[in-house]
Image (cartoon, helix red, strand yellow):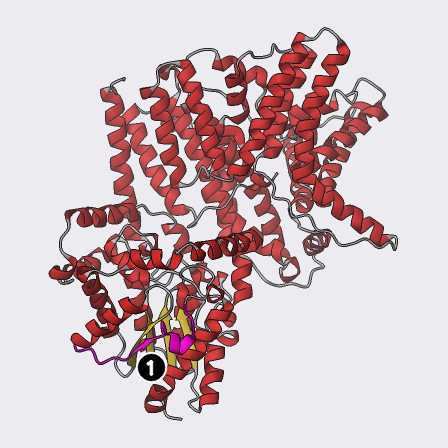
Amino acid sequence: MLFTQPIFFAFLAVVLALQWVVLPRNQARKVMLLLASYVFYAAWDVRFLSLIILSTLVDHVAATRIAAADDPGTRRRWLLLSLVVNLGMLGIFKYLGFFADSLQDLIGAFGGEVSDVTLNITLPVGISFFTFQTLSYTIDVYRGSLEPRKSLLDVAVFVAFFPQLVAGPIVRASHFLPQLDTTRRLADVAWRPALTLFLVGFFKKAVVADTIGAEVDKLFADPAAFGWLATVGGVLGYAVQIYGDFSGYSDMAIATAMMLGYSLGENFNFPYFSRSIDDFWRRWHISLSSWLRDYLYIPLGGNRGSELATYRNLLLTMLLGGLWHGAAWTFVAWGALHGGALALHRWWTRGLGRRAGDSPVANAAAIAGTFVFVVLVWIPFRAVTFGDMTQVLTNLVGLGDGAQGLSPWLAVYLAGAAVLHALAYQGRAAKLPDTLPAPQYAAVLGVAAALALALRPLGSSPFIYFQF
Amino acid sequence: MRRPSALVVRSVLAFAATFVVASVAIRLAAPPNPDFAWHPTFSAKVDHLRTTTEHYDVVFVGDSRTYRGIDPVVLDAELDALGCPANTYNLGTLGMSKFEYDHMMEALAATPGGTPEIIVNVEVTTLLAGLIKDFSLRNRGHMSAADAQEYLEYKSNLPAEDFGTDPAELLDTAAGFAVNQIPIGAVHQQLFEQAAEVDESRLVDEQQGFQPWPEFEAEAGPEGMANLLATLTPELENGGWEQRWAEEDLDDERLDQWLHVLGAHMDNVPEGSQGVQLFLPSFFDEGTLADIEDGWAAEGRQEPIVNLVDTDLIGDYTDPTYFLDFWHLSPTGSEIVSKAAARELCPLIQREVGG
């Protein structure tokens, strides 16, 4: 069940009706939201619902026992159980096949012989998201920054809340759980921002990302066949596609939660307008980057040690961040490049004391430089093999032999996306609906919805981040 | 329960009104491309017919059961061996609405290679299903406002004694039209060439329009294949055939509907071509098909029927190894059926094509 499919709209209409019309009591609403979330997940694969339930039960018990124990050893053991269960599930379902294949390749490279065993393990959708989310709960309780919940229902709703279950944002327990304490009021729902945000997210995903993605797929399926211009278009196209796809999903998730009376927090803040790579990671997939900062980078030592140790921590954090995105060495390479860039940026600004100026020209140059770096580093992220990555880079420097082109409409879509994005960045795009009376706003929304449906491709493409 | 305020009601109505008006306007401005039904194979095959100079003697028209069931390479080899050589083509596509069928017939009538001598209509279960239940994905490609007049004319010309005027059916038709006015993909389809996704050479040079097993396997994926094969045998072992046939058992009204639909499509076979009606296993049992054949003759239809649901022709037509699921043949079934079709068609080919 994708946010862009008609079935989801029917599902959402039922859930909204139950939330706001049928069920007045908070407890009944939470039960309904939990059941709805399980139905939402089971629509993909009912088998893996058991993983979510297991994770919920383990973390509920672990958090309760951690809080109840005075002995540091006992507390550590319960935390360890939570880590082992959650990271164990992630390891088995996401990384076991990858590491087994890599080991086989390594032994083979040194002339060893191993039996060719291929592990066909299905990746449960959203496992990277809900395991990280639930881990934050037990870790926060262990650190003493959060009281554990007595109610298993609350923890279960927090882990499974359907708007963010399969592709984030990765919500912190300290942000979400208190919202379950009070009965949400219909009068408090900001319907207009929620509906606008949902439509914007739908447009980003179904119109921009899916349309551009079809052209990008052609390039990355056979990069040797394409010429320089098509490669530039395809590489830029992927940058737009992944942003539209993922931030579109986040927008729809946040908007859906808003309609139900809950807040999920921000996940994207115009990352392609970042002035540095450091700035980029404060704006791109904010819920993951802040999770990595709080639960990985800081425990590793953060910037509390020597400069060299800080660079190491940055690199390690981003390497693991890369691996979080997918079990492939291309993702590790992507993480390494970002980690290296973060370390370099720190050395440049802190070590050498250099900073970009504040003039408009310096500002534009900083934004352009960061954008070019991020776009180029998307290449290993998107390429299936290092061979494909090398071919795309070869095409980019004009040494490729291919001559094939992509649809000329790609340029129009890229230009249109850039203009709309710039307008939104300057805060102009959403002002018109805000000033209109409700019926006129609804009328504008009706036309916009029809246009968005007409501009989207037939059929629905899965969200890129579902596979992570 | 809360009552919605007047402002909410006005807003919802405003949304609905502008959405409907904008949708219909977009549908009228950007009508569906009739070359693109709901699967690109359809448009690739229509494109091929419009441009090819190759002459096909025999063309099989049908849905996925034909696309995956009649193998022209096997069939032509068998025809050669029988001394009645012919060049055949598989015009099967996934799904088949009345509009798609008519569109294919128009393309066949005008193909530069010359209209085939024999057109074999394989029974298409969705033709009747799509007719009765208009709210069907398989009709989406053609159910635009622009098609409304043609479609309503067709519906109104259906014999009332067979199809009746069930209010629920009319409501279903209205709902189907309404839903299909939502212009999903309407502008996108005008901008991007969908048909390019299909490798035409595969459909033309290599398999003569047939979808071979490995390609289907690749489409279904390992998990999909495993699921299909795992569910087939238990389904058949537990009285699956009898249950399915009982579901399709024709009462008099349903039999008349089938006869009308089959006859109407046979009437669309282009001038100069001999129409043939072919039945593949396993949608009907022998008894039901005997009723259809009797009805066909009683209506005075002259077009020959090739009924392959016959133990004498293909052996045990309930053999699970013949099938992938209840509707679709396996490679084994496809080979047996294609050879049997060749044997049955050989005398007609000798008469119509020569050789």
Asked if residue A305 is positioned above or below residue B248 in the image, the reply reads above
- Does the magenta-highlighted stretch encompass residue B308? yes
**Quadrant containing the C terminus of chain A in the rendered view:** top right
Asked if residue A350 is positioned above or below residue A387 in the image, the reply reads above
Which residue in the structure is indicated by mark 1?
A: B118
Point out the residue furthest to the bottom here.
B355
* Residue at figure coordinates x 70%, y 22% from the top left: A81
- Tag 1: amino acid: Ile
Q: Which residues are magenta?
A: B300-317
Q: Is residue A370 among the parts visible in the rendering?
A: yes
**Quadrant containing the N terminus of chain A in the rendered view:** top left
Q: Chain of mark 1?
A: B
Q: Main secondary structure of the magenta part?
A: loop
- Does the magenta-highlighted stretch encompass residue B248? no
Q: Position of residue A389 (x, y in %)?
A: 70, 51
Compare residues A382 and A447 and report the one nearer the observer: A382
Point out the residue furthest to the top here.
A70
* Residue at figure coordinates x 38%, y 78% from the top left: B312
Quarter residue A142 falls in: top right
* Residue at figure coordinates x 28%, y 57% from the top left: B129
Q: Position of residue B259 (x, y in %)?
A: 21, 68
Point out the residue furthest to the left here.
B161
Total tally of numbered discs in the picture: 1
Q: Secondary structure at mark 1?
A: strand
* Residue at figure coordinates x 69%, y 20% from the top left: A294
Q: Position of residue A169 (x, y in %)?
A: 56, 28
Asked if residue A307 is positioned above or below residue A105 in the image, the reply reads above
Q: Is residue A268 among the parts visible in the rendering?
A: no
Q: Say left or right for A27 vs A447.
A: right
Q: Position of residue A193 (x, y in %)?
A: 41, 24
